[in-house]
Amino acid sequence: DAGITQSPRHKVTETGTPVTLRCHQTENHRYMYWYRQDPGHGLRLIHYSYGVKDTDKGEVSDGYSVSRSKTEDFLLTLESATSSQTSVYFCAIRETGGSYNEQFFGPGTRLTVL
Amino acid sequence: AQTVTQSQPEMSVQEAETVTLSCTYDTSESDYYLFWYKQPPSRQMILVIRQEAYKQQNATENRFSVNFQKAAKSFSLKISDSQLGDAAMYFCAFFGNEKLTFGTGTRLTIIP
């Protein structure tokens, strides 16, 4: 257990509303990631962070923004949710420093945009 | 950009038998890591096994082992003595350039 929690775990919202998902870690890892999972696509990287206030885009970043003001929290924001953003969202941390660079995942958030 | 291909959307195996899940990848990098993750119905992503590209020896974790063929860019997962609890989606993943790229997954069914 890498001490990763996500909130909320489930959310239903309407098109056009803003949504923020939170990822919280307890072990001070530098790298944090947001992925989305859709049928037929596996997991795809949205954004990642390599330190406080340091973020970069992944392959499916359009329509999403992120922020990291503290080491332990990585926020994913949908400024104006669309039905195409209905998905399961996973947060992950990456262990570094002599390891295999494994990523460990949170439990996921199921987001439905109506 | 890296790509990961899992050509078997679904596989099934008899309980106690052995099954092999296929994975190929494409990259121009020489230093990278490969992983297999398991996702049961609970949705939790669970790391099964990992391999460093510069290690020729195939990784093994209990009943799980890999066949890593670097020149062929192949990274298959063998599950021995299959158990009912092995039923899940299995994802192959490539780590390079700070990013993890996943295949589309293989759904494994265990037949009692």
Image: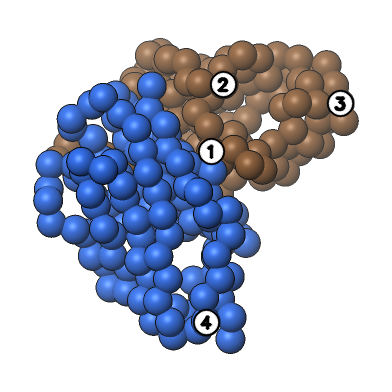
How far across and how far down the image is residue A29, in percent?
32, 35
Dots 2 and 1: beta carbons under 8 Å?
Answer: no
- The residue indicated by pointer 1 is A43
A26 versus A73 height, above or below: below
Q: What is the spatial separation of the Cα atoms under label 1 and label 4, in whole angstroms? A: 28 Å
**Toward the viewer: B34 or B56?**
B56
Give the residue displayed 24% in from the left and 52% down from the top.
Answer: B68
Left or right, A65 with reference to A111: left
**Toward the viewer: B42 or A40?**
A40
Q: Chain of mark 2?
A: A
- The residue indicated by pointer 3 is A14
Tell which tag, 4 or 3, sits nearer the viewer: 4
How far across and how far down the image is residue A37, in percent?
60, 39
Q: Earlier in the sequence, mark 3 or mark 1?
A: 3
Write down the colour of chain B.
blue
User: Which structural element holds mark 4?
Assistant: strand
